[in-house]
Image: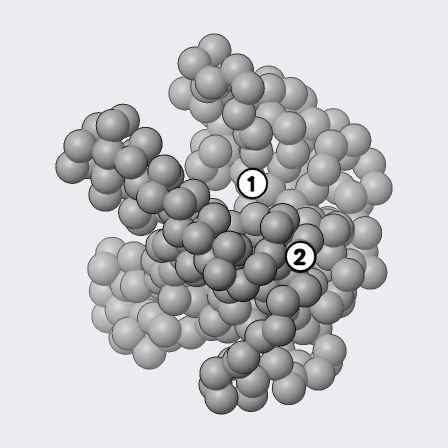
Amino acid sequence: LGSQRAMLERPELASTYEVRDVAPSILLFGNVGVVQARETPTLALREMVDRVGADALCVHMNPAQEVVQPEGDRDFRGGVETMARLARDLGKPVVAKETGCGISPRTARRLYEAGIRHVDVSGSGGTSWVAVEMKRARGTKRGLGELLREWGIPTAAAVAFAHRAGMQTVVATGGIQTGLDIARAIALGATIGGMARPILQALDASGPRGVREVLERVELELRAVMLLVGAPNLEALRAVPRLLSPELDRWLMLGPTAGR
């Protein structure tokens, strides 16, 4: 789901998030910003998750977007403590989610130590929410957006960092467009891959039929890559030999204290 901040602030909007009646069997994640989660009692967040029938709660971290956003949050203190509280008390899986800037080794380790076992790395290379906010901003904020629009850790590196930290689930998002992209992410330690732009473009161009065709293409591509590297299943794909680009190799030399 999109951010449920509006639902927290205006409970009458809850019905706009309720999709279980049309998609009863999908894996559904609730979604709230870490700043809003910090200010909201755990019970209220659990009720928000239950109200929409979500299987888990994504808690998104988006400081780069917020500092460019005209009305964005500025105080991000207490984020790790909030993650720890929810991991301990929510009673539903908690997914720490970035929003286009990736997750550093240090952040991945701190999340793990806080009890988080599931992350969506949302690395750079896909949609830049800094650039989106830059379009809305004026004056110095617009200049800040222009400066930081490419800020972030590439998805491939963020996946490897999260995997190294011991995460149980690593969702690879951020610029994923093909089955080959997903295969590469899984080989680096991802559990699953996610994409948005190709799906939305197909929906806009051809409706549900176009979406189905994109998903079938991605599955075919992933299966073909697995065949070519001799991986009968995803676990075997994670163990295949890897040839890293010089740039990615440099990223992966970062230690656990690097980054935010």
The residue depicted at 31 percent of the width and 48 percent of the height is 197
Front residue of 166/112: it is 166
Extreme residue toward the left, this view: 205
Relative horizontal placement of residue 240, taking residue 167 as reference (left or right): left
Front residue of 174/71: it is 174
Local secondary structure at mark 1: strand
Local secondary structure at mark 2: helix
Amino acid type at circle 1 is Val
Looking at the picture, how far across and down is residue 71, in whole percent? 39, 53
Relative horizontal placement of residue 152, taking residue 252 as reference (left or right): left
Residue tagged 1: 32
Amino acid type at circle 2 is Ala
The residue depicted at 56 percent of the width and 85 percent of the height is 249
Looking at the picture, how far across and down is residue 242, in whole percent? 58, 75
Relative horizontal placement of residue 170, taking residue 243 as reference (left or right): right
Relative horizontal placement of residue 204, taking residue 175 as reference (left or right): left
Locate the C terminus by quadrant: bottom right
Q: Residue 236 got which mark?
A: 2
Judge whether 145 appears above or below 127 on screen: below
The residue depicted at 57 percent of the width and 34 percent of the height is 29
